[in-house]
Image: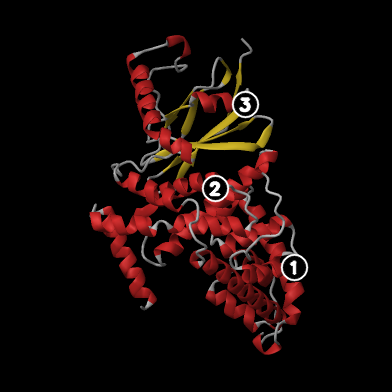
Amino acid sequence: MSNVHPDRHAGWLREWHAEGRLDDVQCDELLACTHCAAEAGELAQVLEALDSAAEEVRKSDLESDQGDAPGQDEAEAEMRRLMGEPRAGGAPGVTSGWMGRLGPWLAVAAALVAALLLYGGDKDDGPADSTPIELAEDKIELIRPLGEVSDHERFEWRCGLAGIGYYELRIWDAKDRESEERFETYDSTPTWIATDEIRASLPRQLRWQVLARGDDGEELGRSEVGESLLSSD
Amino acid sequence: MPRSESHHQDLALVQGVLAGQSDAQGKFCTRMRCIGRILANRNRRYGCPLNDHDLADLAQETAMAVWRRLDTYRGLASLETWVYRFCALNMTSAMRKRRRSPRPLSEIEFDVEPSVEPAGAADEAELDSMLRHLSEREAEVLRLRHVDGLGNQEICEVLEISINSVKTHSLHAMAKLRELFGSRLPKEAR
């Protein structure tokens, strides 16, 4: 046991507090310090008590079966439904049950929009510039809606990242960051179409951001935040 | 059955599912009924903020998340324990969303006395006895980390706060607990 208490110990103790774990070597050094040993020992005991209580709670959640829990049939049926679909490109990626049922339709809509964009439709509401743009490999660039727009139906962006499984859109009221809703694209097409129902619920002035995710859901990158406002016409 | 053997069997089951073996898929789907059970137990634990319809939707959503990540299962824990984190993450997000939107009066149940003791009430009481000394946010961070098994990055996404805030709340929470409970711990254990 040593009475030497270097400054780095305080940082390590803080890390232990925050992370709940510490490198073995650092741990040994702390325990060899008189000043830190008591604090570290107490902390370990608190963590153990906390983990033990938490483990019991988790075990109870896993094992307790009080009859027919709602959602059991739905979980099983949904899994059977998903198994009937090809896994390539990730499973349908929408965020709620009712949206899950819309998944195939959203995919068809996304494909139609992609075809329209490719073969030229609706020029006055098209992307600001349809010529291919070199995009940095680590960049996601928002295209629309930005600024004042006539609708919030079609969301588009460009992405220079490789290995995209799907995109996650985060949309919130420009005046209320807490109102954020998250939506996911069906595949790696950089477009998302809001259904009528979703569009009706979107705020007039919104901010949005796109996160690129791999097939396993890992975040690969994110765009800057864009803002748009529905014109009053 | 030794735990490791059980996990090995779970891993083999998942590999069978991903390979498209129909018997493995059948067994797996039955096992995934646990999603509904876990969500229902957690809902009960938190005083039933979600109704049956919400739970059914959430179960579907969780099944979808599990399916999407199934190829990342490595057999380090049982299938149910692995699925637990998906349930915890989705449930927490759903409850936070719910708290942000006003709840129709017709959906509020006024039964104060539950007819049966909630699942794991004793364990919950023990955990609560520790967490009630903390602020709501501090307790939430510790719950997400220790009960739900989420990492700092996941916690900051669920709570929509920065990773530094997660660490700060955790730091304050642990310091409070150490102060409150540390001195009561047996000396020989230090």
Q: Residue at x 58, y 54 (%)?
A: B155
Q: Which residue is mark 2?
A: B52
Q: Residue at x 33, y 20 (%)?
A: A115
Identity of the amino acid at label 1? Answer: Lys
Judge left or right: residue B126 versus residue A208.
right
Q: Which residue is mark 3?
A: A203
Write down the quadrant of residue A203 in the picture.
top right
User: Distance of mark 3 from mark 1, alpha carbons?
Assistant: 41 Å
Who is closer to the viewer here, A62 or A30? Answer: A62
Which x, y percent locates residue A87?
Answer: 30, 44
Disc 2: host chain: B
Write down the quadrant of residue A52 in the picture.
bottom right
- Give the number of the disc on residue B176: 1
Q: Label 3 near label 2: C-beta < 8 Å?
A: no
Quarter of the figure that contains the C terminus of chain B: bottom right
Q: Label 1 near label 2: C-beta < 8 Å?
A: no
Considering the numbered disc 3 on the image, is that residue within a helix, a strand or a loop? loop
| Rendered position, B7 above or below B69 | below
Considering the numbered disc 1 on the image, is that residue within a helix, a strand or a loop? helix
Who is closer to the viewer here, A161 or A199? Answer: A199
Do discs 2 and 1 share a chain?
yes
Pointer 2 or 1: first along the chain: 2
For marks 3 and 1, give the one nearer the viewer.
3
Identity of the amino acid at label 2? Answer: Asp
User: Distance of mark 2 from mark 3, alpha carbons?
Assistant: 29 Å
Q: Residue at x 30, y 62 (%)?
A: B13
Q: Residue at x 46, y 36 (%)?
A: A99
How many marks on residues?
3
For marks 2 and 1, give the one nearer the viewer.
2
